[in-house]
Image: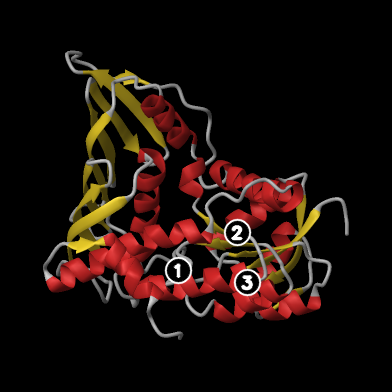
C-alpha cells in the first residue's frame, strides 16, 4: 500500500466531483479507482483528476482493487445493499453519502451488515463540519445568550429539478425534500442542540407548479427530550426564486440567528436592538466542509479515532423523516421511537 490511503470513489456526479476534488487535494489519501455506470462521467473524472482504473459498479471496483483502503459512495441512495455487503466482506471502511437508504428498516439492515464484520460505516453529513456549525455550537456551549428554549428552522427555495447540473432521480422519488434535503437539517438539529426528538406533527404538500412527482414541501413541529421545541419549514418549491434561510434559536437571555446555510451567524441579548455578528473562518463552498468530513473519516481509518457520523446514529435522523411521512399521511402526531421500533421488527428485504 502507498503512503496515501487508496480510495475507491463510486458516483461521479456533482457530489462525486466534490469528493474527487478534496481527495486530490489531500496529502493523506488518493483515488485508486472510479466507479459510475455513466461512461462520460468516468471520462470527465479521468480528464480532470487523473486516469485511474474505472468500472461500471462499486462491486466491480472493489473486486478489482484489492489494495484499496476505503470506499466512498457518492451515488444515489437506492440499491446499496450489494455495495455494502461487498465492502463489508472485505472489511473496507465506507463513507456513504446521505441518506444511507430511503427507509429506516433498510438503513438499519445496512448498518447491521457492516457491524457483522466490524467495518466502519460513516455517513457524509458535511454540514456538521461547516465553520458556522462549530461557531453556533460554541455559542450554545458557552451560554453566550443563555440556554436554548425553542427554535425555528426555515429553508425556502425554488429548486428547479430540471437543471442540467442537478441529479434527476429526486424528480420521481417519494418525499424528495425530506429525504434529500431535510435529512441535513434534522441531523443538525440533533447534533447542534445535543438532544433527541421524541415527537413530531408534520404536514407535507406539493404546490401546483411543482415539477416533482411527490411532496416537495414540509412543515413540522418537533418536541425534543429536553423539552425544547422546533418549528421547521423546508421548501423545495417556494413561490419565489430567491432562496431564504434562517435558523433562529431563542434562549433564556437572548437569541442566536444563522441567516445563511454556509455562514451569517449573529446573536443578541434580550434588550439589545441590533444583532452582533460572529467572526467565521473563510470557506470554499462544498469543499471546505467536505475536506473536514474526509479528514474525520481518515482519522478513523488511518489512526483509529472514534467514528463520527456513524450509520447507527444516522438511523435516528432517518426516523425523524419517516415519522414526518407517517404524520402527514395519517394526520396525527408520531413518536420517533415508534418508527425505530417498527424498523427493528420489519421483515428482511
- Reading the image, the residue beneath label 3 is 116
Q: Is residue 155 left or right of residue 14?
A: left
Q: Kindly indicate the quadrant of the structure image that contains residue 112.
A: bottom right
Label 3 or label 1, whichever comes before in sequence order? 3
- CA separation, marks 3 and 1? 33 Å
Residue 17 tag number = 2
- Reading the image, the residue beneath label 1 is 167
**Up-down relation of residue 249 to residue 184 (above or below):** above
Q: Quadrant of the C terminus?
A: bottom left
**Up-down relation of residue 248 to residue 6 (above or below):** above
**Up-down relation of residue 101 to residue 93 (above or below):** below
Kindly state the secondary structure of the residue where label 1 is placed.
loop
Q: How many residues crowd around disc 3 within 10 Å: few (fewer than 14), some, or many (20 or more)?
A: few
Q: Nearer the viewer, residue 77 or 329?
A: 329
User: Residue 229: x percent and y percent?
Assistant: 21, 43
Seen from this angle, which residue lies furthest left?
A: 331
Q: Nearer the viewer, residue 70 or 85?
A: 85
User: Residue 250: x percent and y percent?
Assistant: 22, 30
Residue displayed at 35% across by 67% down: 340
Seen from this angle, which residue lies furthest top?
A: 272
Residue displayed at 72% across by 51% down: 24
Instruction: Check whether the beta carbons of the residues at disc 3 and disc 2 lie within 8 A of each other.
Output: no
User: Residue 69: x percent and y percent?
Assistant: 77, 62
Amino acid at each position: 500500500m502507498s503512503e496515501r490511503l487508496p480510495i475507491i470513489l463510486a458516483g461521479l456526479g456533482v457530489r462525486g466531483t466534490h469528493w474527487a476534488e478534496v481527495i486530490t487535494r489531500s496529502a493523506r489519501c488518493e483515488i485508486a479507482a472510479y466507479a459510475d455506470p455513466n461512461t462520460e462521467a468516468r471520462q470527465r473524472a479521468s480528464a480532470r483528476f487523473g486516469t485511474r482504473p474505472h468500472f461500471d459498479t462499486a462491486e466491480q471496483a472493489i473486486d478489482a482493487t484489492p489494495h484499496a483502503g476505503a470506499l466512498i459512495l457518492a451515488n444515489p441512495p437506492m440499491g446499496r445493499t450489494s455495495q455494502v455487503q461487498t465492502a463489508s466482506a472485505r472489511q473496507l471502511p465506507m463513507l456513504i453519502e446521505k441518506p444511507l437508504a430511503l427507509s429506516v428498516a433498510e438503513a438499519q439492515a445496512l448498518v447491521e451488515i457492516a457491524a457483522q464484520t466490524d467495518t466502519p460505516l460513516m455517513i457524509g453529513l458535511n454540514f456538521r463540519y461547516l465553520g458556522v456549525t462549530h461557531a453556533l455550537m460554541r455559542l450554545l456551549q458557552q451560554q453566550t445568550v443563555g440556554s436554548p428554549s425553542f427554535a425555528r428552522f426555515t429553508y425556502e427555495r425554488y429548486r428547479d429539478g430540471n437543471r442540467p447540473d442537478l441529479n434527476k432521480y429526486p424528480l420521481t422519488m417519494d418525499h424528495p425534500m425530506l429525504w434529500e434535503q431535510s435529512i441535513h437539517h434534522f441531523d443538525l438539529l440533533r447534533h447542534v442542540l445535543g438532544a433527541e426528538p421524541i415527537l413530531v406533527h408534520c404536514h407535507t404538500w406539493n404546490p401546483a407548479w411543482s415539477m416533482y412527482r411527490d411532496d416537495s414541501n414540509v412543515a413540522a413541529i418537533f418536541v425534543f427530550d429536553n423539552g425544547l421545541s422546533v418549528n421547521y419549514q423546508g421548501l423545495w418549491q417556494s413561490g419565489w426564486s430567491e432562496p431564504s434561510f434562517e435558523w433562529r434559536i431563542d434562549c433564556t437571555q437572548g437569541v442566536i440567528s444563522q441567516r445563511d446555510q454556509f455562514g451569517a451567524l449573529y446573536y443578541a441579548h434580550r434588550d439589545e436592538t441590533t444583532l452582533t455578528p460572529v467572526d467565521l473562518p473563510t470557506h470554499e463552498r462544498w469543499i471546505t466542509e467536505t475536506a473536514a468530513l474526509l479528514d474525520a473519516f481518515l482519522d478513523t481509518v488511518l489512526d483509529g479515532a472514534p467514528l463520527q457520523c456513524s450509520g447507527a446514529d444516522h438511523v435516528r435522523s432517518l426516523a425523524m423523516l419517516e415519522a414526518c411521512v407517517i404524520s402527514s399521511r395519517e394526520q396525527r402526531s408520531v413518536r420517533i421511537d415508534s418508527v425505530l421500533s417498527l424498523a427493528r421488527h420489519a421483515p428482511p428485504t
